[in-house]
Image: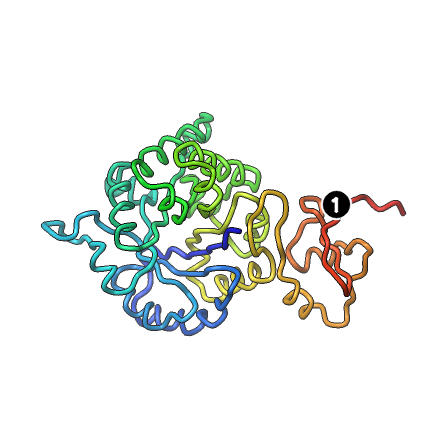
Amino acid sequence: MRKPIIVGNWKMNKNNAETKAFFEAVDGVAASENATYGIGCPFTDLRTALDHAKNLVVAAENCHFEDSGAFTGEVSVPMLEEMGVKYCIIGHSERREMFGDTDETVNKKAKRLIKAGITPILCVGETEADYDAGNSEKVIREELAGSLADLCPKCVGEMVIAYEPIWAIGTGKSASVEIAENCCKIVRDQVKAMYGEEAAEKVRIQYGGSVKPNNIVEYMAQPDIDGALIGGASLKEDSFTEIIEKTKRGTVNSSSDNRIFNYSTVYLSMISITLSRAAPSAWILRSIGLDKSRLKIPMIDLASITYLPDTKSKS
């Protein structure tokens, strides 16, 4: 069972006062035993974020692979370790495009983070030109082959890998659910090819690229998508809170065939409504963010919960 992980990436946004206000507003909502919620913030905000985070995990947005030296403006892993940071984003397309990160340097960062006990959130993804040329799979596999080189299977299984099509980052465009699922499946298959089935089944894979409250549930319903790396929608307290609330009452874990749902939340949100063994009506499914056509429909009675295949009504 893979525990979903949804992390905001603030990029170069928010000062300490804004960080404090955000965590005070959102942290309480993020309490969950079934999923991990967090925020990646600039280095200057990390101390404030950590001081106000009880439920949200805090991630750094980058690191250097060297522990110290003449690297003006860089942040070392020991600096993050001393602060108590537990996650760090590496290999983001903006770092690759603007600041010269390569698969080789990303691999060095991953190794140093793992040594420090900090979980890497490793980003991969293709450009629009690569996508249009039909090279998405080739790019994803090549980036993973370089970025994950010479690691141990256990270490890779404990990482987070974020598939972010570059053409969908900050553009308002988003990959269709089918494209996102297919590419995340490619990520899992590449991990399997490099480090075996156990690592592939354990590694958590996020989708990132214009993820918003109105599409998060559909992405999370896919078997190979275990979370999301969220940009713009994580900057606003109300939108990130909505994403948390929607996923808390929806997806709990990934498996090859089914999603397990938190029915207690759904039940409380439907006071005086009794779900019988009749197929749930469309409006009930929509109210919990489900599309009847895409999923097996869970039926509830007082004694047990069973999964029955979705069938067309005979009436």
Q: Is residue 204 visible?
A: yes
Q: Secondary structure at mark 1?
A: loop
Q: Position of residue 78 (x, y in %)?
A: 20, 57
Q: Could you tell me residue 74's position as x and y percent? A: 19, 52
* Above-or-below relation of 244 to 24: above
Relative side of 202 to 254, left or right: left
Q: Residue at x 88, y 45 (%)?
A: 314
Please tell me which residue lies in front, 91 or 297.
297
In this figure, which colouring scheme has been used for the structure? rainbow
Residue at the limit of the structure toward the right, as seen here = 315
Q: Residue at x 37, y 41 (%)?
A: 153
Q: Look at the image and tell me whether residue 209 can be seen.
A: no
Query: Badge 1: few (under 14), some or many (20 or more) residues near its Cα, within 10 Å?
Result: few
On the rendered structure, is 106 left or right of 275? Answer: left
Residue 50: horizontal and vertical position, in percent? 32, 68
**Closest to the observer: 129 or 148?**
148
- Give the residue type at disc 1: Pro
Total labels: the figure holds 1
Counting from the top left corner in percent of width and height, residue 168 is at 45, 42
Height in image: 58 above or below 292?
below
**What residue is rendered at 79% in x and 53% in y?**
279
Residue that appears at 30% across and 55% down: 117
Most extreme residue toward the left is 70
Residue that mark 1 sits on: 309
Residue lying farthest to the top in this orientation: 133
Q: Is residue 29 above or below residue 186?
A: below
